[in-house]
Image: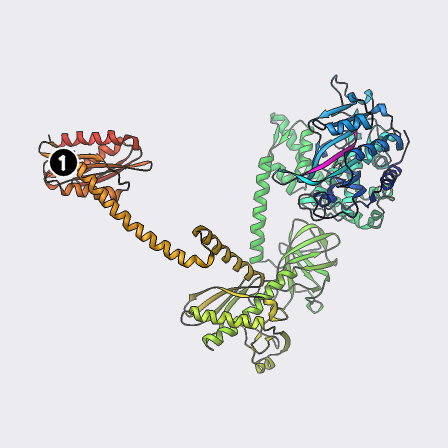
Amino acid sequence: MIYMTGNELRKKFLQFFADKNHLVLQSAPLIPENDPTLLLVGAGMAPFKPFFTGKMNPPHPRISTSQKCVRTGDIENVGRTARHHTFFEMLGNFSFGDYFKKEAIAWAWEFITEHLEMPVDKLWVTIHTGDDEAFAIWTQDIKVPADRIIRMEDNFWEIGPGPCGPCSEIYFDLGEERGCGNADCAVGCDCDRYLEIWNLVFTQYDRDEAGNYTPLAKKNIDTGAGLERIASVLQLKPSNFETDLLFPLIAYAAKIANVEYGHSNKIDVSLKVIADHIRSMTVMIADGVLPSNEGRGYVLRRILRRAVRHARLLGIERMFLVEMVDVVVEIFAEAYPDLGEKEAYIKKVIQLEEERFQTTLVQGMELLTKHIQALKETGVKILDGATVFKLYDTFGFPWELTLEIVEEHGMELDKQAFDIAMKEQRERARAGRQANEEQVIIPDLSHLDTAQLSINEEGHDANVVLLWKNGVIVNEVHDGEDIGIILDVTAFHAEGGGQVGDNGFIEGALGKIEITAVKKLLNGTVYHLGHVIEGSLKVSDAVALKVDLRRRRDIARNHTATHLLHAALKEVLGSHVNQAGSFVNPDRLRFDFSHFSQVTVEELAAVEKIVNRAALENISVDIIETSQDKAKEMGALALFGEKYGESVRVVSVGDVSIELCGGSHIRNTAEIGLVKIVSEAGIGSGIRRIEAVTGTGAVEYINARENLLLNAATLLKARPEEIITRVDSVISKVKELEQELAALTAKQAHVEVQELLAKAQEVNQVQVVVGQVSSADMDGLRTVADLVRDHLKCGVVALGSVNADKVNFVVMATKEAVAKGIHAGNIVKVVAKIAGGGGGGRPDMAQAGGKQPEKIAEALQAAVEVISNQVQ
Ligand code: SER
C-alpha cells in the first residue's frame, strides 16, 4: 500500500477519473440548491440529482468530485466508532446515462489495487441479492473469487426522495485484532474490522415522497468513497481520527485540555467529538449556515453546543472553539481555500454562539445533574418533559444533547411531553407576535435623532440604528426573538392610509430578520417589526434590505386600482360618492364609500368597465410632493381621516384621478392588468363596500370561477355554454318526476289501504287494522293511516314502516273506538318499546320511532294484544 496524505489522496482520485474523461468539479456548497427535500448535502450525488433524473443536462456525461458532506443521523456514534462523522468528504465518480456497471466496477478496482496498491487479499465485495450482472462482472472480468462476494438484501442506496438504486460495495479487512471477536463477525458487522471504503450505486430509480420507485430513463453510476476512511487505511491508522485530516484537531484540543490522547476511552471520545464537530461547524458557516432553532441552523447549533459540552467534560472551561478554526483552516488550506478567506467571519459566528451557550451551560448542567440525582434516588428512569423543555428554552440545551446526557446515566427522557411543550410555546409565540403587531410596545425613542433617518424605497443598504425587544432597547438581538428595529435609511414602505406595509428581510453579516410589519411613528419615523430567524444582529451593523418586491407590486396594483375605482364610482353614481375608508393588501382591495341606495348590477358593470378601460389605456401614474394649497389648486381629493402637513404627496393618474396619498403605486395603469369586482354590499347607513382584485389576484379569481363552471358542466355532462339550458331542463325534469312520484305514491297508498282493510279483524265490535306498509317516512305513514281510519266507523289502525335503519309507527283511532277504551298513545308506547324506541300521544292519534327494524313484526303483533286488552 502507498502512504498518502489526505490531500494527496483527494488529488490522486480526481486525477485518475480526469484521465478517464471525467469533468472534475469543485465541491458544491453544503446548502443544497433548489432541493427542499434536503437540509444539507449529505452525499456526493446530492448536487447532481437533476442530472440523474434527466430534469437538467449535465455539463459532461462523466463528472468527478470530492464533495463536502454533513450527516447527523448517526451523530451519537461520532467518536465512539472509528469511522462515523458529521462532516466528511466523499470522493465520487458519476455517469449520467454514459458508462455503467462494467466500467464503474473495473475502475474502482483499478484505482484501489493499482493506484493505492491495496492488497487484493484484504478486499471483500458485496452486491445486491439479485444482481447477477454485477456478480458476473466481479467474478469474470475482475476475477474476484466467488466466495469473496456477498449478496446482501439491503444493498440498495437511497437518501430520502430522489435518484437511487442497488449498490455494490468494497470492504477492506483491517484484521482480526480490530474485530469484535464474535464468531459470526463478517462483512457487514457493525464493528470496526471490515471497513466499507467504496460504494458503487447503480442509479436506476427515482423515489418520490410517497415511496414509489419509478425507473429512470437512463442508467447511471454514482460512486462514493469516504476520503477519511481510505486515508485511515493507507496511513495505517486505527481510525479516521488519527489521519492527517483530523488528528491535528485532536492534538490541539488535548493540549488545551491538558489531557493525553489514547489512554482513556472517555477522554478520547470527547476529543474525537470536538475534532469532528469543529470541522463541521467551520465548513457549514463558511457555506452560509447561521445558528438558529430551525432547520440547518439548528443542526449547526446542536453540533456546536455538543462540542462545547464535551470540552467541559474534558475540563476546558474557557472559550476555545475560535482558536480551533485556525487548525481546520490549515488542514483544508489546499482543498477549500475559501475557509481562509472567510476565517474572520467564521470565527465571529462561532464566538457569538459559544459565548451564548457558555453563559447558560453551567447553570443548565447544575439543573440537569440535580434532576438526574433525584431520579436516581427515586428509581425513576425518565426525565420529565417540562425539565427537558426548560433546559432547551432557558439554557439553550438542544433536546438531543439532554438525551445524550441522560442516556449516559442509563435513563431516557419524555420526548412526547417535550414536543407538547414545544408546540405550546410555538403557539404562544405566534399569538404573541399577533398581539405584538396589534399593540406594539415601543420603547422611549425621544433621544432618537430623527433628522438622521431617511427613506429610500429603491435602496438596498442601511445601518442598524436601534433595536428593541419587549419594549426594551437592547444592543443585540438573537435568533428566535421578536424584535423592533429602526434603520438609518429604510427601503420598506410603512403601513398607512389603509395600505398594509412591506414585508421582507433585513440581513446582516451574522444574522437575518424576517420583517412582518412596518409602521410609522407620529413624527414620521419608520420602524420595523420582525422575527430573528438566524444568527444575531447588533446596533451599527451594516445590513442588506430585501423588500419582497413582488408583494409590493401587488399592493401597488391594488392601490392604484382603488384610486381608479373611486373616480369611476363618482362618474357612474354621482359626485356625492366619497371615500369612507379603504384597505389595500397584496390580495385584494376594499373600498368603502357614501351612497344611499344599492348599486345595481348595471352600475357595477359600468364602473368595472371604466376602471378596466383606464388600465388598458396605459396611463402613467405621477407622484409629486407639493404644498397643500398647490394640491388643492390641482383639484386633488383628500383622503378620509388623514392629517396632512404643509407638504403633501399628490398621486395623479392622467386626468382620470388625482388624490393626496402616501401609498405605494405602480408607474403605469397597464401594470394593473385586469380589475375584477368581486362583491358589493351595504355596511351601514349610507355606506357601501366594494371588494375587487387585480393583476394575478384577478387571474386567480377568474380561474377559480372558471373551475366552478367546468365542474358544474362535468356534473351536468354538458359543455360550459350549455349549462343554463341543461340546468333548466334538469329543473323541469325534477318537477315532472316529483309530480309522477306523488301520483304513484297516492296510488300505492290506495292499494295498501284496500289490502289493510281486507285484513281488518273485529274485537269486541271494534275494527282493528294492523300491518306494515311501504311508505318509508312518517308523513307517508300518517297519510295511509288517515285513509284507513276514514273507512272505519268504530275502529283503530296501527301501522309500521321501515325507514333505512329505523322504524316508524302510527296509531289512530276513531271517536267511537276511543269511547270504547282505545288509547292510541298507550298502544304506540308498548309497540315502540319492542322495536327499541319510545313515543306516545293522544287517545286518538299517536306516533313513535324505534331503532330495531327487525322487530317490526313482533311489535305490530303486540299492538293487536294491547288493543284487545283495551276493549275487554
Ligand atoms: N451515494 C452513495 C453514497 O453516498 C455513493 O456515492 O454512499
Per the rendered image, the range of residues in magenta is: 195-206
Tell which of 158 and 7 is nearer to you: 158
Task: Report helix, strand or loop for mark 1.
Answer: loop
The N terminus sits in image quarter: top right
Taking 569 as reference, is 333 left or right?
Answer: right
* Residue 422 seen by the camera: yes
The image shows residue 576, relative to residue 159, as above or below, that is below
Q: Which residue is mark 1?
A: 822
Tell which of 690 and 340 is nearer to you: 690
- Residue shown at 14%/30% (left/top)? 868
Residue 658 falls inside the magenta stretch: no
Q: Residues within 10 Å of mark 1 (few under 14, many from 20)?
A: many
Query: What colouring style does the render use?
Result: rainbow
Please tell me how many numbered marks the rendered image carries.
Answer: 1
The image shows residue 543, relative to residue 63, as above or below, that is below
Tell which of 641 and 786 is nearer to you: 786
Residue extending farthest bottom: 633
* Residue 640 seen by the camera: no
The C terminus sits in image quarter: top left
**Residue 734, position in %: x, y?**
33, 52
Name the image quarter holding residue 18. top right
Q: Amino acid at mark 1?
A: Ile
